[in-house]
Amino acid sequence: MMPTVELRKVSMRFGKVTAAEDVSLTIKDGEYLAILGPSGCGKTTLAKMVSGIWEPTEGDVYIDGRRVNGIPPEERRVGYVFQNIVLFPHLTVWDNAAYSPRVKGLDRPQQEKIGNEALELVEMLKESDKFPSELSGGAQQKVGLARALATRAGLLILDEPLSALDARVRMELRYTLRKLVKNLGLTAIHVTHDQEEAMSVADRIVIMRKGKVVEDGPPSELYHNPKQLFTANFLGESNFLEGVVDRTIDSWAVIELRNEQFLRVRGDGLRRGQAVVVSIRPEHLTLAKVAAAPMLTGKVQDVHFAGAYVRYEVAVRTGDAMIVDAMADEARFNTGEDVIVLFDLEHVRVYPRPYAGLQEALKLE
């Protein structure tokens, strides 16, 4: 059995600054959880409270049903991989990996067994005689991961483990991380600000903002059906159009946007006169020359080739700038060309307009 982790109404304050506020969260046995959010949102604070590096100002932390407030990190059976690669420069790869069993006082055969197993798991056993300075950044982080695995902890905390690496190494190592966690049956908490990284490794993602949990769920559910505007904006990209419900017809709603533009969408639960925000992701829009509802007319402002797709910036009649991502082999449009923007109704989401305004709801700080 791997540990279940539970945070019960935890808060962390540094003087007048609140890093985490009234967070309740359960991480299941064997779950790979990603905590995702912009810088300063409190995600690393949660990880450090679980590990015991920081004690919560309020609330309780439970690991496998045991309240661990006041219990030091070394007694929590937690392996921690840091954002900045932290290895002992004067020790070899093997000595770094075997550090935990050595300080626990295990005999030499046990140290060798655990150290070798950990390095083999991350495919670094052949480099065991080298020093950290002789390794690439990606290889050094693999050694850091081996050292965490050598603690024989059931809970692995990964605090921005890939952010110091270049893009290609990050992509390769993220899959190594998930494979290891799943093959070993570990419980993992992976802190990151990289949306693609979170979606590719996690069973479940927790979205944080300003010290609070915004929402959580499986990556596909959060991406396709975000309940909050902030999630729709932060996880991937979205276009947003503000408007007012002009009328409802059965399960449909006609929304009046700016400049007397109208858009017909599915509108269960919407009411006439309600202020709303319409959201749709760039890949769920299509550019055309022939009108077909639902649609808006506009003019191409800019075109960016991005390999598999082409990104269009379109100024629509509402006065908004919209982003449309089209497959590269589809019909091409040029800057200055008049176009029709077609909406895929299955992927249109309508939210109540936030009381504080759309921009405030989307702010990353």
Image (cartoon, grey):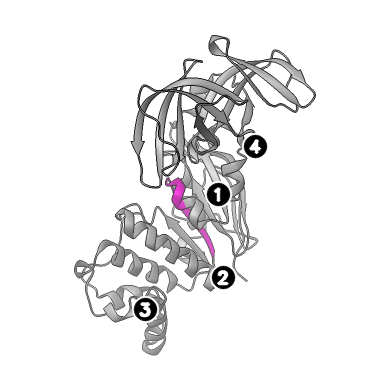
Q: Amino acid at mark 4?
A: Glu
Q: Which residue is mark 3?
A: 102
Determine whether 307 is above or below 265 in the image. Answer: below
Q: Amino acid at mark 3?
A: Arg
Of 181 and 306, nearer the camera is: 306
What secondary structure is found at the residue carrying circle 3?
A: helix
Nearer the observer: mark 2 or 3; the answer is 2
For the residues labelled 3 and 1, the Cα–Cα distance comes to: 35 Å
Q: Amino acid at mark 2?
A: Gly
Q: Which residue is mark 4?
A: 346
Outermost top residue:
260
For the residues labelled 2 and 3, the Cα–Cα distance comes to: 24 Å
What secondary structure is found at the residue carrying circle 2?
A: loop
Q: Earlier in the sequence, mark 3 or mark 1?
A: 3
Magenta residue span: 187-197
Nearer the observer: mark 2 or 4; the answer is 4
For the residues labelled 2 and 4, the Cα–Cα distance comes to: 37 Å
Q: Amino acid at mark 1?
A: Ile
Q: Earlier in the sequence, mark 2 or mark 4?
A: 2
Q: Is residue 123 left or right of residue 282?
A: left
Q: Which residue is mark 2?
A: 185
For the residues labelled 3 and 4, the Cα–Cα distance comes to: 57 Å
For the residues labelled 2 and 1, the Cα–Cα distance comes to: 18 Å
Disc 2 + disc 3, Cβ < 8 Å: no
From the top left corner, tell me how far across and down residue 169 is, in percent: 33, 60
Q: Which residue is mark 1?
A: 205
Of 261 and 198, nearer the camera is: 261
Q: Is residue 21 left or right of residue 166?
A: right
Q: Is residue 314 left or right of residue 96?
A: right
